[in-house]
Image (tube, rainbow, N blue to C red):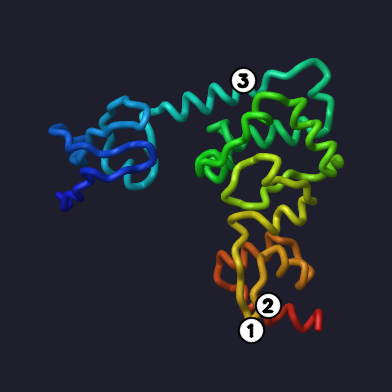
Amino acid sequence: MSRLIDLTGQSFGLLTVQKESDIRYKGHARWHCLCACGKKIIVVGSDLRSGHTKSCGCTRAESTRKFNISTKIKHGQAKHPAYNVRKKMIDRCYNLANKNYHQYGGRGIIVCQEWLNDPEAFITWAESNGYKQGLQIDRIDNNGNYEPSNCHFVTSKVNNRNRRDNTLITVDGITKTQVEWAEKLGVHFSTIRRHKRKNTFKEFYEKRKSRIE
């Protein structure tokens, strides 16, 4: 049996560990935890440490409630092109089934109450802040929320460059994002990402750079 890691007193998301449970799960230690909402649950230690369980489930219920409320719209609003921008923004933050939820709602990123509760308020702000069909909403501070003071509209190209997971690559003392290397070398972004993943980017760069010099 592996050595027990004492989690007593530690906090994981909204959960604070109180004590170890007398009953194990398939040989794994379980812990009595108190959620910030006041509910008590028992969680396997590995689920706490990995971040798999961060609350008693209250955040999931709240996310579902907000997502359901935010999708209720007035007649005609869904026809405005900015409405789809708002819909995707909310989906990333509150729909746990969204493939990108872990990068937004899963990190605590939320949509301000004004935009969440009133589609018309978001559409009005968008029209007053340079929105054109095809543009994407971008957060100025990637750790900040979706709110008027932290958002503007950019092209998909700029948004990709600003993405939180856009890894930097340094070759010959030059540091660029994957998007910037793709532009410089005249290839698709996926080509750069593939060579980065295989650790073959330097070799690819040496072969490719002679064609653009």
The residue at which mark 2 appears reads as 205
Which mark, by number, is residue 69? 3
76 lies above or below 207: above
- Residue 38, percent across and down? 32, 26
- Closer to the camera in the image, 45 or 154: 154
Secondary structure, mark 1, is: loop
Callout 1 touching callout 2 (CB < 8 Å): yes
Report the residue at 26% width, 31% height from top.
42
- Residue under the image location 81 percent in, 45 percent down: 135
On the image, numbered disc 1 is attached to which residue? 172
Q: State left or right for residue 59 relative to residue 23.
A: right
Sequence-first disc among 2 and 3: 3
Circles 2 and 3 in contact, beta carbons < 8 Å: no
Specify the amino acid type for callout 3.
Ile
* Amino acid of disc 1: Asp
**Which residue is rendered at x = 73% and y = 78% of the image?**
208
Closer to us: mark 2 or mark 3? Answer: 3
Give the SS element for disc 3: helix
Residue 122 drawn at (x, y percent): 75, 32
